[in-house]
Image: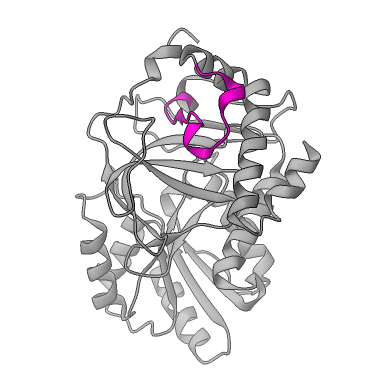
Amino acid sequence: MINLKHKIFNIQSEEEFVQTALEVFHFQATDNSVYAKYIALLNIDVNSVDSLEKIPFLPIEFFKSHKVVSTDEEAKAVFTSSGTSGNLTSRHYVPDLGIYEDSFTKGFEAFYGSINDYCILALLPSYLEREGSSLIYMMEKLIKDSGHPKSGFYLNNHEELIANIEELKGQNKKVLLLGVSFALLELAENHQLDLGDVIVMETGGMKGRRKELTREELHSIFTSRLGVKKVHSEYGMTELLSQGYSKGDSLFETPAWMKIMIRDAYDPFSYEKTGRSGGVNVIDLANLNSCSFIETQDLGKIHPDGKFEILGRFDNSDIRGCNLLVSG
């Protein structure tokens, strides 16, 4: 287990990724009772799994109905999704917050460089209004680690936010403005700005707040109203401890311990070729203490350069296979 934890964040090649992923699979297929039962009900012989394509992926809905854990250690945090009223929310039990902190810090720095070079301005009002947000935990740590006096959460305080950005423009400091989509949209609708080199990053999150817009429509508004050439994006979720990042054009990349696979929309055990759309499966090796192999409800495709795109979500929320463990 300790050896696996060390391996995950030191992967240097595709071969090392596959080897580590298979080790994690065999560990979780034994030590994660929910995953083990799911595999047994699929009549899959664990010992026959010798490639990524043979690994069964756990439907993400199980995080709503079961305690998905691969350890007996007590959870130091339980991250929850922001479900609408009356809906079940996902619960991700995390006994080792050090793994999560390593994942989001190393992941961010792999794409953007040292966190110390940044001033981080966060517009996440809906997340701050509830408990159990993994995004808030991540941003609190990154804000603290940036060490900049202006880094922080700005809720709906647009005037202070804009004033600080203007002041920061004259300094030799990178500025990251990260926000939930509807909060960035409110800023863009109420203010015509010229943010220049400020990195504007959206994390999604329009559901139930505003009329749904496509990512392209949102980014078009942001570029024209906020005065930036590109809009960056973060791809993450409660059920994952790692994130993918896009530096523009909605094309995402993942850190070395995370991988996206596109499954056939009608056959979850076959995979689409590059350029063809299908269901998004995520391997997140940082999910060592829960399940690293997640079948999401997202639709996407992988481009020839290895970057991936999120195209939307499945219309039917019930992913095939979820009813196998209804009784728990």
The residue shown at (47%, 20%) is: 65
- Residue nearer the viewer, 277 or 273: 273
Q: Is residue 57 magenta?
A: yes
Q: Could you say where residue 229 lies in the image, as x and y percent from the top left?
A: 32, 80
User: From this viewpoint, is residue 286 visible?
Assistant: no
| Tally of marks | 0
Q: Is residue 181 left or right of residue 16?
A: left
Front residue (pair 71, 173): 71
Which quadrant of the rendered structure holds the N terminus?
Answer: top right
Task: State the image coordinates of residue 223 (x, y, percent, origin top left).
Answer: 28, 75
Q: Residue at x 34, y 79 (%)?
A: 228
- Residue in view at x 57 percent, y 74 percent: 119
Q: Which residues are magenta?
A: 44-62
Q: Position of residue 161 (x, y in %)?
A: 45, 73
Q: Could you tell me which residue is drawn at 59 percent across and 50 percent down?
A: 137
Residue 12 coordinates in the image, percent (x, y):
66, 59
Do we see residue 310 in this rendering? yes
Q: Nearer the viewer, residue 204 or 31?
A: 31
Question: In the rendered image, which quarter is residue 303 located in?
Answer: bottom left
Say if 278 sits above or below 39 in the image: below
13 w.r.t. 149: above or below: above
Scheme of colours in the image? one colour
Along the viewing direction, whichever of 53 and 179 lies nearer the viewer: 53
Queried whether the magenta region covers residue 266, the answer comes back as no
Q: Residue furthest bottom?
A: 170
Give the farthest residue toward the top: 327
Q: Is residue 319 left or right of residue 74?
A: left
Left or right? Give the position of 226 relative to 161. left
